[in-house]
Amino acid sequence: METDRRAVAAVMKAERALGRRPEQQEHSNPGFDVLSYDPGNHMHYLIEVKGHLPGTEQISVSKTQVGQAQCSPDVWRLAVVSVPNEPDVEPEVRYLIRPFEGVTMHEAQTSIPLRVSDLLAKSQPPH
């Protein structure tokens, strides 16, 4: 829970630094964790936050999150947040845009496991 809290807080801070107005969503919101309004282009961004500790090799994304990403490809973001063990060190926020383009899930699949190292290699700073 603490890792998730720190990861969401880091994304909220990154979004504010971009001039956006982020709002944390209820924990039960199935498709994303942060709704962020950009007053410059009047768009709302849907951000799914996946925080991980050092040494974490894999995270999972739910079928619902993949579907939300595919339905809203221009505004949905996957935020991969590296949360250090030290509580006073800032987490590093990285975004993936259109991370599930071309992905087809089997009807029986409930989630997709993703390798953290691969996500970080393809990610970029928030923008």
Image (cartoon, rainbow, N blue to C red):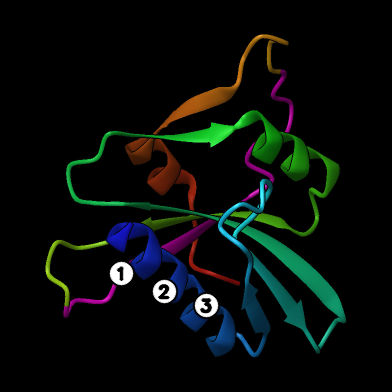
Residue 82 visible, this angle:
no
Mark 1, other Cα within 10 Å: few <14 / some 14–19 / many ≥20: many
Give the labeled residue for mark 1.
91
Please state which amino acid type lies under the numbered disc 3. Answer: Met
Counting from the top left corner in percent of width and height, residue 119 is at 44, 42
Question: In this image, 15 relative to 57: left or right?
Answer: right
Counting from the top left corner in percent of width and height, residue 73 is at 79, 48
Report if the CB atoms under discs 1 and 2 are less than 8 Å apart.
yes
Where, quadrant-wise, is the N terminus in this rendering? bottom left
**Secondary structure found at label 2:** helix
Indicate which disc, 1 or 2, sits on the residue closer to the N terminus.
2
Residue 32 visible, this angle:
yes
Residue 61 higher or lower than 73, as above or below: above
View extreme (left): residue: 86
Counting from the top left corner in percent of width and height, residue 127 is at 61, 72
Please state which amino acid type lies under the numbered disc 1. Answer: Pro
Give the labeled residue for mark 2.
10
Mark 2, other Cα within 10 Å: few <14 / some 14–19 / many ≥20: many
Q: CA distance from mark 3 to mark 2?
A: 5 Å
Give the labeled residue for mark 3.
12
Q: Nearer the viewer, residue 5 or 66?
A: 5
Q: CA distance from mark 1 to mark 2?
A: 6 Å
Counting from the top left corner in percent of width and height, residue 113 is at 46, 26
* Residue at position x 57%, y 87% in the image: 16
| Start-end of magenta stretch | 88-104
Which mark, residue 15?
none
Mark 3, other Cα within 10 Å: few <14 / some 14–19 / many ≥20: many
**Secondary structure found at label 1:** loop
Question: In this image, 28 relative to 98: left or right?
Answer: left
Please state which amino acid type lies under the numbered disc 2. Answer: Ala
* Residue at position x 56%, y 25% in the image: 111
Report if the CB atoms under discs 3 and 2 are less than 8 Å apart.
yes
